[in-house]
Amino acid sequence: MQLTSRLLVAAAKLISGYTVRWKNAMPDTCQRIYFANHTSHLDGLVLWAGLPPHLRELTRPVAAKDYWEKGWIRRHVATAFNALLIDRREVKVHQSPVDLMIREMEDKYSLIIFPEGSRNVKEQMNKFKSGLYYLAKKRPDLELVPVYLDNMNRILPRGEVLPVPLLSNITIGAPIWLEQGESKQQFLDRARQSIIRLRDDEE
Amino acid sequence: MLFDTLHPFVWGFLEESSKLSLPFEKRTAWLIAAVMISLIIGSLVGKLLERSSEERLNSAVVRSFNQRIRSWWLMCAILIAGLVIGPTGTVVLFGMIAFWALREFITMTPTRRGDHRALFWVLVIFTPLQFFLVGLNDERQMFKVLLPLIAALFVPMRIALANDEKRFLERSAKILIGILICVYALSFAPAILYLKIVDSTGQLWNANKGLLFFFVLITQLNDVMQFGWGKLIGRNLIADRINTSRTSEGVIAAAASSALLGALFCWVTPFLFWQAALIAVVISLTGFAGGLTMSAIKRDRGVKDFGTLLQGHAGILDRIDSLCFAAPVFYLLTEYFFTK
């Protein structure tokens, strides 16, 4: 498993040639939710690989069960980067994704989530799903860290199997928290804006 | 004086290396030793400048100087590693440089969703295949036709297959010019290793590694001299909307100094000193052409350096633009006049 995860990091670096920038943020082992824009199947893997090794061990990407449980290779890869698989189709009342995430986080893991839900094909980011809000509400101690992934949609766009090994950027920004009296929509808009700001600063 | 102190040391190294029969020629070893020594001196000077930069010197210039020295170390290490491993090693290393350069080029160039599969072919299949053919070194020399013929026809076809007609010609042209400059042109540099050279007396001459080293050395030194002379005596910008540092005075002075350097280093080449001087002038002018063309591409895209495009990346394309343009011309001249 160690070997597979090393190989995964090397492959992610080779395929996406990423550069990581921490902007008004520092790597830390405290519990965090990294939330990012989502345009490619590689997003979770690349963001996870871009973290320093000691954080990588403590960080689990949240991914779709229907995709990552298909076939031996995907299953193996998902275990190697300790993915937390969520069933998108069967959402039960006491088994909601947010509950599952909170349970699986325990008191040491951080998560990587993509609040847009599914991969985006448009220029603009989609509206955020409400999961991030409920996470923030149930666990106010978590740091919510915005991440902007640049160029991933050109490396492996939706509907393609073979990646084109271009170069990409991972920009990690300052954490946000749910503010006193903030409504769900206000908070989700603010979270979305924090990623857009990272993108605009870059350009 | 420095030369006198170092002389026994270098000589000892060479004696040793000839006893061990290192896999490259003595003259090449001399050249490498000379380059290493100047790099060591350069690094020391850079360190000194860094310390005193706060008081007098422009720190941006110092930083760019140090960056250049660092990338030279890398280039030098690549060449030496390649020389020790053998010609195949050099070809593979140049292939990796070309791959990285093309990556930078395409990352900077906007493409459409429909170009995805064409780009996959270009980066993952054609680029390695080109360097494989260079290393294969067969008589038919397929590496000379693969990209400008086969890839040039294949890429537009693959884009057409993706069923997206928007700006079709423009998209094909962007990808093709990328392959032409970053991959095809650069692949002529390691191809120098496989030329069957005869010198001007008609003798077979086989220290091709030294010749490659000579070529890279003159190209890189010429870059610096063009910049330096331009700063010192430059008056008239050649194309002020494209590049604000290349002046006609700088280009002429650099060509003259390159000629001098070429003649000075003619002992590692099959050329007579005047031939070496002449070919150094050609390297100088084609190197200038490369820098200018790349500046135009960068201006068109609105970036200053390929390096700043993605922070933290070295910006390989900034360093090899002159090499890309000079390599095919240098190769063809050598092939035309110095092979049977």
Image (cartoon, helix red, strand yellow):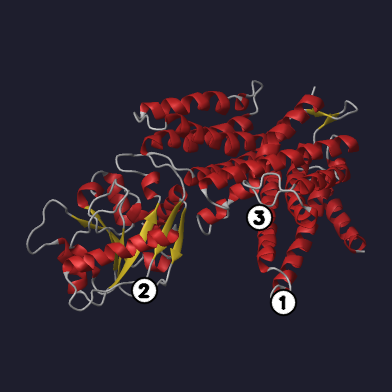
- Which structural element holds mark 1? loop
Q: In which quarter of the image is residue B335?
A: top right
- Compared to B166, does B100 lie above or below? below
**Residue pointed to by mark 3:** B71
x and y percent of residue B19 in the render? 83, 48
Q: Quadrant of residue A132?
A: bottom left
Q: Mark 3 lies on which chain?
A: B
Q: Residue B55 carries which label?
A: 1
**Residue pointed to by mark 2:** A29
- Compared to B114, does B138 lie above or below? above
Q: Which chain carries label 2?
A: A
Q: Which residue is drawn at 76% across and 42% down?
A: B284
Q: Quadrant of residue A154?
A: top left
Q: Which of B308 and B135 is in front in this view?
A: B308
Q: Residue at x 28, y 45 (%)?
A: A72
- Which structural element holds mark 2? loop
Q: Residue at x 45, y 44 (%)?
A: A165
x and y percent of residue B191 in the render? 68, 33
Label 1 CA crowd tier, 10 Å (few <14, some 14–19, many 20+) = few
Residues under numbered marks 1 and 3 in contact, where contact means CB atoms less than 8 Å apart: no
Q: Residue B109 carries which label?
A: none
* Residue type for callout 1: Glu
Q: Which chain carries label 1?
A: B
- Horizontal arrangement in the rendering, residue B258 relative to residue B168 (left or right): right
